[in-house]
Image: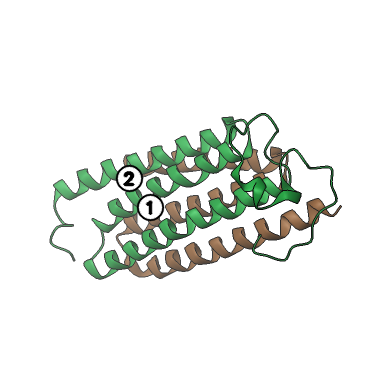
Amino acid sequence: MGAVFAVVLVMVGVAAALALYRLLRGPSTLDRVVALDVVVVLTLVAAAVYVAYYRDGSNIPLLAAVALVGFVGSTAAARLAVRRERHR
Amino acid sequence: MNPVAAGPVADVVSAVLMLGGALSCLLGAIGLVRLPDLPARLQAATKPQTLGLSLILLGTALRVELASAVTLVLVVLFQVITAPVISQLVGRAAYRSGGFPDDTLVVDELAEHLPADAVVGDEQQPADHDELA
């Protein structure tokens, strides 16, 4: 069972590294906003794996809070990124 | 402790669900790197991630007690509701800032409503509408 968690975390880590590549490489600001949203979801996934491994449900309200706050961050960045790029 | 969570069957089911969820997240991230332009990357960034998160949270819900499992359903609901909103906002922002190259659109129905932002007419000066971007 521990091996399953290790494999899951390695896959999530590789996915986060790929999203980091898009964050660094992405030719526009919106590409980077999308990559950061992917990183937020992967953070949720890793926190859920932690909860599953320790069978301890006391961090689950943290997941709900991160889901909401991550959404607000991506929305604000998408909205403000456009104005700045167009009025350059 | 949830009586379902204590058995070995629940362990196997939860392991399969979590592996499936992690695989879906990884495929979404591969799509994020490999797809050619922003609208395609939006698809890869939201749909497989939502599916992967749902599968992993379902696997987690089998391992914790029932009251916490209900909160996990709430997290899935938040993600399902907010991912399309992000897609729509980023897609529209990409349309207005030139993220859609000229040859990728077959039908452009938004050009009638946003004439100053239309994909072919990008050399005009920007219109300052303050509507919802």
Which image quarter holds the C terminus of chain B? Answer: bottom right
- How is the protein colored in the picture? by chain
Image-quadrant location for residue B73: bottom left
Q: Which residue is mark 1?
A: A49
Q: Residue placed at 50% from the left, 66% from the top?
A: A68
**Label 1 chain ID:** A
Q: Amino acid at mark 1?
A: Val
**Label 2 chain ID:** B
Q: Amino acid at mark 2?
A: Met
Query: What distance separates the C-alpha of mark 2 from that of mark 1?
Result: 8 Å
Could you say which is closer to the camera, residue B132 or residue A8?
Answer: B132
Q: Residue placed at 43% from the left, 42% from the top?
A: B48
- Chain identity for the colour green used in the image: B
Q: Which label belongs to residue B10?
A: none
Q: Residue placed at 51% from the left, 41% from the top?
A: B43
Residues marked 2 and 1 touching at CB (< 8 Å):
yes
Could you say which is closer to the camera, residue B54 or residue A8?
Answer: B54
Q: Residues within 10 Å of mark 2 (few under 14, many from 20)?
A: many
> Left of A1 or right of it: where is B29?
right
Asked if marks 2 and 1 fall on the same chain, the answer is no
Above or below for A59 versus A18 = below
Chain A rendering hue: brown
Image-quadrant location for residue B69: bottom left
Q: Which label belongs to residue B18?
A: 2
**Residue A71 image position (x, y, % from top left):** 54, 61
Q: Residue placed at 21% from the left, 45% from the top?
A: B13
Question: Can you see residue A33?
Answer: no
Query: Helix or strand or loop: what does disc 2 sit on?
Result: helix
